[in-house]
Image (cartoon, helix red, strand yellow):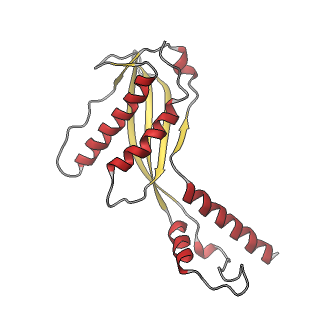
Amino acid sequence: MKGWNRYAVSGLLSLTLTLTSCSSVQVESQPPGRFSAEQYQSYSWRAALPSGISGSMDELYRLSTIVREVVSQELDKKGYRSVESDGDFVISYAFKATLEAGVDPAATEFNTTSAVINRGVDPAEAANAQALAGPREIASLLLVFEDGKNLAPVWSATVSQVVENRNQPDLAKVRRKIEPGVAKALRVLPDAP
């Protein structure tokens, strides 16, 4: 039974590493029923764009600008009109960073040399396995669409991505990741009437 346990753990570990290495943007959204029923035609943003402040808030301003541009482009494709205020629906968004636990290497009995006879440890594989086994930072964008009259939530979606380089954010790369995520999230919404 102990040998079977090792194979199960090694299979699970390799599957996890495969899924993690191939993972891209993850999207979760609510069904569009409540949104569709209202026949919205225009939208506005719930809050003003954060002003460009030098220092740490500058990244928030640039990221907020990217999110608004990407969401507006996708809604424009569907025929929705952007208005300065009092839109049929109002869009708000929030950013969140969380840690996702990885595989605890101390909890497994898997030894890389025990899987194949006469095989030494490949340093690159061992380094990759160690790097991917630890906790990962997940950056998420939460989009909330609310009714323009009573601010009741009518639809929401979350777009998440593993943070690849926290110390040197590349906003062009962030935009390339946000675009397909937002497009996928908004795909479920109907075109404007």
155 above or below 171? above
Q: Residue at x 38, y 44 (%)?
A: 175
Q: Residue at x 60, y 63 (%)?
A: 17
Residue 86 in the figure: left or right of residue 143? left
Give the percent coordinates (x, y) of residue 65. Answer: 29, 37
Q: How many marks?
A: 0
75 above or below 11? above
- Pick the front one: 151 or 12: 12
Q: Quadrant of residue 145?
A: top left
Residue 112 in the figure: left or right of residue 176? right
Residue furthest right in the image: 1
Residue furthest bottom in the image: 118
Residue furthest left in the image: 54
Q: Quadrant of residue 81?
A: top left
Give the percent coordinates (x, y) of residue 83. Answer: 31, 18
Give the percent coordinates (x, y) of residue 48. Answer: 26, 30
Q: Residue at x 26, y 41 (%)?
A: 61
Residue 94 in the figure: left or right of residue 130? left
Quadrant of the rendering where the N terminus is positioned? bottom right
Give the percent coordinates (x, y) of residue 134. Answer: 51, 67
Q: Residue at x 54, y 18 (%)?
A: 36
